[in-house]
Image (cartoon, grey):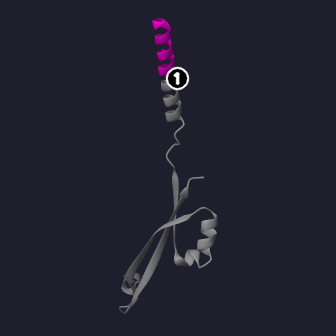
């Protein structure tokens, strides 16, 4: 009876170790992302819905205020440039 019980305990231990190893192997690999960024004039009002339908998710918006002097214009006025950053799982 002792040998039989020892074999049963060993069989259960092997089964548990096998299940644990299998479960660890089945974990999903980390998601690989791809990124896209654009300015408003590249996207337009309807572009957000189009990008969303393609799986893109808006993750950040960055607006920069720039002087027109940065563009070689005479006179000191300002303009802003807004950039939209998107990501989606790599396809």
Q: What SS does tag 1 mark?
A: helix
Quadrant of the rendered structure where residue 80 is?
bottom left
> Residue visible at 37% across and 93% down?
75
User: 61 or 41: nearer the eye?
Assistant: 61
> What residue is drawn where x is 45% and y is 79%?
81
Res. 56 image quadrant: bottom right
Magenta part of the protein: which range? Answer: 1-14
Q: Residue at x 42, y 77 (%)?
A: 63
Where's residue 89, x and y in %?
A: 55, 54
Instruction: Look at 38% across and 81% down and name the residue there.
Output: 65
- Residue, disc 1: 15
Does the segment drawn in magenta span residue 8? yes
Q: Is residue 3 found left or right of 44 in the rendered image?
A: left
70 in relation to 5, above or below: below
| Front-lying residue, 84 or 11 | 11
Name of the residue lying farthest toward the front: 1
Instruction: Tell me residue 86's x, y (percent).
Output: 51, 65
Q: Locate residue 20, reporting x and y percent.
A: 49, 30
Q: Is residue 5 above or below residue 44?
A: above
Residue 25, compared with residue 84, is above or below; it is above
Q: Main secondary structure of the magenta part?
A: helix
Characterize the local packing of mark 1: few (<14), some (14-19) or many (20 or more) Cα atoms within 10 angstroms: few
- Please tell me whether residue 62 belongs to the stretch shown in magenta: no
**Left or right relative to 9: residue 70:** left
Q: Is residue 13 left or right of residue 67?
A: right
């Amino acid at each position: 009876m002792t040998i039989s019980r020892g074999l049963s305990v060993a069989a259960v231990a092997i089964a548990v170790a096998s299940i644990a190893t299998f479960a660890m192997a089945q974990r999903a690999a980390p998601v690989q992302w791809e990124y896209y960024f654009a300015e408003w004039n590249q996207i337009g009002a309807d572009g957000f819905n189009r990008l969303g339908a393609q799986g893109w998710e808006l993750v950040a918006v960055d607006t920069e205020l720039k002087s027109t002097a940065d563009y070689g214009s005479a006179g000191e006025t300002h303009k802003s440039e807004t950039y939209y950053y998107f990501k989606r799982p790599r396809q």
